[in-house]
Image (tube, rainbow, N blue to C red):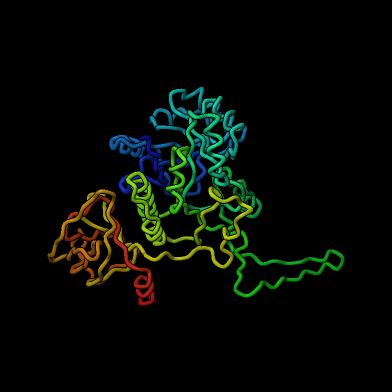
Amino acid sequence: MHKAELLAPAGNLEKLKIALGYGADAVYGGTSTFSLRIRSGKEFDIDSYSEGIEYAHSLGKKVYCTINSFPFNSQLKLYENHIAKMAELAPDALIISSPGVVKMAARIAPNIPLHLSTQANVMNALDAEVYYDMGVTRIIAAREISLKDCEAIKSVIPDLELEIFVHGSMCFAYSGRCLVSALQKGRVPNRGSCANDCRFPYEMYAHNPETNTTFRLEEESEVGTYIMNAKDMNMASHVDEILASGVIDSLKIEGRTKSPYYAGVVTKAYRHAIDDYYSGDFDESRYQAELETTQNRGFTDAYLISRPFEKNDTQSHGFTIQNGTHQVAALVSEDGTSWKCKDKTCIGDSVEIVLPVGATVEIVDNEYGTIEEKDGSYWLTFKKLEATSGKVFECIHSGDLNDIILPTTLPSYTILRRGINEALEKKGLDT
């Protein structure tokens, strides 16, 4: 049976390794040049990106290179040089938006598959066929596409791969074609520098040009003024329908600029959803419980199953983002011997251990702490907070760069977390 791919975001080398460890079959990302996430200061440089590709390939997994911004005339030679440079690193595909750049890449890197970005807004078989004839092997469909439209495209071009978004931020505009950021900040979204102006609260005014009078409109109480703030996509409950259709080749998670915790937990939730479907044990409540642990803007199942005009729950007017049910307390190092603090942690604290896919943990009790199993989860209780430098703490605070010794070696990039109420209590103690 051909199984659908799980594709996760890789904003930097650490998040690439986390996404792969937590169950991704492939990751996508790129150096900041000509990628739609150039505003992120944590993107790859050439060396770290090359290392990431080699690391993924050593695991038998894939890396798709993002070159998905839209060029100015003055940048065309730079694009040629960049494509040639990326091709030397041997990624498994190039993700491109512009038809001109598709043609350029086919000439410069003929042996690397071409994936068409969601920015190209393909919604029908006619447009898909044009790009397929140009050499594109996969279409990353617009977020607004329906599953029925995907089925229609596949029926016309069965050899064309289809990739859809299943989780992450939704844009206020049609598949990212927004100019609000360009208008207010001079930062052009389709060239990678969106300022996320749609996430801000706004006030509404009425102006009378005859009297030159402006009145502020009073908003209805408790409705809120985040009038362009779209909820986050969450299709975990529909993974069974998506896979049962047989037309989707890749399920994609949005979020290259999001946290390592997001990269790990969201990827793991969808890994389990996909695997459970194929094993006949699909249970949406399991995956939703994990996804609810992450920060979000409220969730919506978007438009894959329901048409846009049938939806009235896709915006969060009252807030820009909310806490999940849990807060990450620490992230274990790559070698598994220590951890760095992400949230205030003290001697005596207990945190839940979130393991990469397929990993196990040893039950221990020593001077540094105890690890025990409770109700199907593993918990670590700290007895001693000692840094690898020898410095000892009663409590350690978020942002501290010391590596704190673990009571036993844990799998690379294991996540340590606590419930949000406990986390907020600790923040109260900090003030």
Residue 59, x across and y down, in percent: 28, 37
State the residue at coordinates (44%, 27%).
Answer: 112
In the image, residue 416 sits, relative to residue 85, either above or below, namely below
**Residue beneath the point at 58% across and 43% down:** 190
Q: Residue furthest right?
A: 210
The answer to whether residue 78 is above or below residue 24 is above
Residue at image location 22% in from the left, 66% down from the top: 374
**In the displayed structure, would residue 173 be above or below residue 208?**
above
Quarter of the image with the N terminus in it: top left
* Residue sitting nearer the eye, 419 or 96: 419
Query: Which x, y percent locates residue 226?
Result: 60, 64
Q: Where is residue 366 shown, x and y percent of the image?
A: 12, 65
| Residue displayed at 32% across by 66% down | 418
- Quick one: which residue is furthest to the front in this view? 280
Quarter the C terminus occupies = bottom left
Relative to 292, is 149 on the left or the right?
A: right
Report if residue 399 is visible in the image: no
Q: Is residue 143 visible?
A: yes
Q: Nearer the viewer, residue 257 or 26?
A: 26
